[in-house]
Image (cartoon, helix red, strand yellow):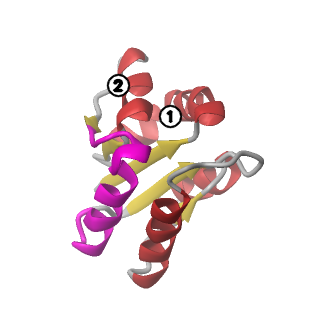
Amino acid sequence: MELAIIAHDGKKAEMVNFLMKNIEKLRENNVEIIATGTTGSFVEQAGLKVTKMLSGPKGGDAQIAARVAEGKTHMVFFFRDPMGKHVHEPDINMLLRMCDVWNVPLATNPATASLLIDHLK
């Protein structure tokens, strides 16, 4: 099962903490993690295995959206900063849309991500 993770700059540490807290559940369910470039670098520094795409502003969000459309990515955790402006907002919206179109679970905060992890099979 492939999980895509993305986090805006102010949420990257929160994403890493969330993953570390839930690492056993992810491993038990053979979850492979992909990430946008900078988020992936943070995750690597924490010692976790991750496949990195481009950074979000350089097309990483679009790469993940394509994987959702291709049926390769099964779940997306995108810890967003709702108070910030982001130059790649159209790519973000496209990713959110692809998750809706292809019925892929999407968590934009740790509370929702926890619910999704608790229901992995």
In this view, which residue lies farthest toward the right?
Answer: 83
Residue at 62% from the left image edge and 55% from the top image edge: 108
In this view, which residue lies farthest toward the bottom?
Answer: 101
In the image, taking residue 67 as reference, residue 118 lies left or right, namely right
Q: Earlier in the sequence, mark 2 or mark 1?
A: 1
Relative to 57, is 92 above or below? below
Residue at 27% from the left image edge and 66% from the top image edge: 66
Say if mark 2 contacts mark 1, CB within 8 Å. yes
Residue 27 part of the magenta segment: no
In the image, the segment drawn in magenta is: 52-72
Task: State the residue position of label 1.
Answer: 19
**Disc assigned to residue 48:** 2
x, y percent for residue 72: 23, 64
Residue at 34% from the left image edge and 51% from the top image edge: 59
Q: Hey, what amino acid is under mark 1?
A: Leu
Residue at 44% from the left image edge and 66% from the top image edge: 95
